[in-house]
């Protein structure tokens, strides 16, 4: 399973179909809004959403950006991972 990291999105695409994605558009100077996560039903229960969030957190840290998680999954993920609180605006 190989994710593609774009400027404000991470996705898993197979055979032209998006199977998983996380969107984090810019919402200010050095800040992004983690507003959407999606995992296709065929991949549910395999920890894919958590892997997307981990890769997103790594990308934010690498690029020095902060996050405002408006997606309910992203907000819950940050609550379960207090060690990543430095990424929150």
Image (cartoon, helix red, strand yellow):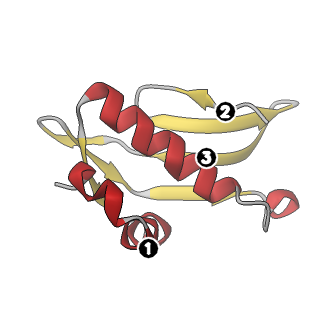
Residue 1 image point, x, y percent: 79, 36
Q: Would you place residue 82 above or below residue 48 in this image?
A: below
Residue 52 image point, x, y percent: 58, 48
SS under mark 3: strand
| Residue 28 location, quadrant | top left
Q: Would you place residue 3 above or below residue 27 in this image?
A: above
Please name the residue that numbered disc 3 is placed on.
Answer: 21
Q: Earlier in the sequence, mark 3 or mark 2?
A: 2
Number of the front mark, 3 or 1: 1
SS under mark 1: helix
Q: Residues within 10 Å of mark 3 (few under 14, many from 20)?
A: many
Q: Would you place residue 1 above or below residue 72 in this image?
A: above
Please name the residue that numbered disc 2 is placed on.
Answer: 3
Give the residue displayed 34% in from the left and 27% down from the top. Answer: 62
Please name the residue that numbered disc 1 is placed on.
Answer: 76
| Residue at mark 3 to residue at mark 1: CA–CA distance | 17 Å
CB contact under 8 Å: marks 2 and 1: no
Q: Nearer the viewer, residue 17 or 88?
A: 88
Left/right placement of residue 8 relative to residue 30 reads: right
Q: Earlier in the sequence, mark 3 or mark 1?
A: 3
| Residue at mark 3 to residue at mark 2: CA–CA distance | 9 Å
Number of dots carrying numbers: 3
Give the residue displayed 71% in from the left and 38% down from the top. Answer: 12
Q: Earlier in the sequence, mark 2 or mark 1?
A: 2
Q: Residues within 10 Å of mark 1 (few under 14, many from 20)?
A: few
Residue 26 image point, x, y percent: 26, 39
């Amino acid at each position: 399973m190989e994710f593609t990291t774009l400027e404000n999105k991470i996705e898993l695409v197979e055979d032209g179909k998006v199977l998983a994605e996380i969107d984090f558009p810019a919402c200010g100077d050095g800040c992004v809004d983690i507003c959407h996560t999606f995992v296709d039903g065929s991949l549910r229960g395999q920890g894919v959403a958590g892997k997307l969030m981990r890769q997103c957190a790594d990308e934010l840290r690498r690029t020095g950006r902060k996050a405002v998680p408006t997606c309910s999954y992203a907000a819950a993920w940050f609550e379960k991972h207090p060690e990543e609180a430095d990424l929150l605006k």
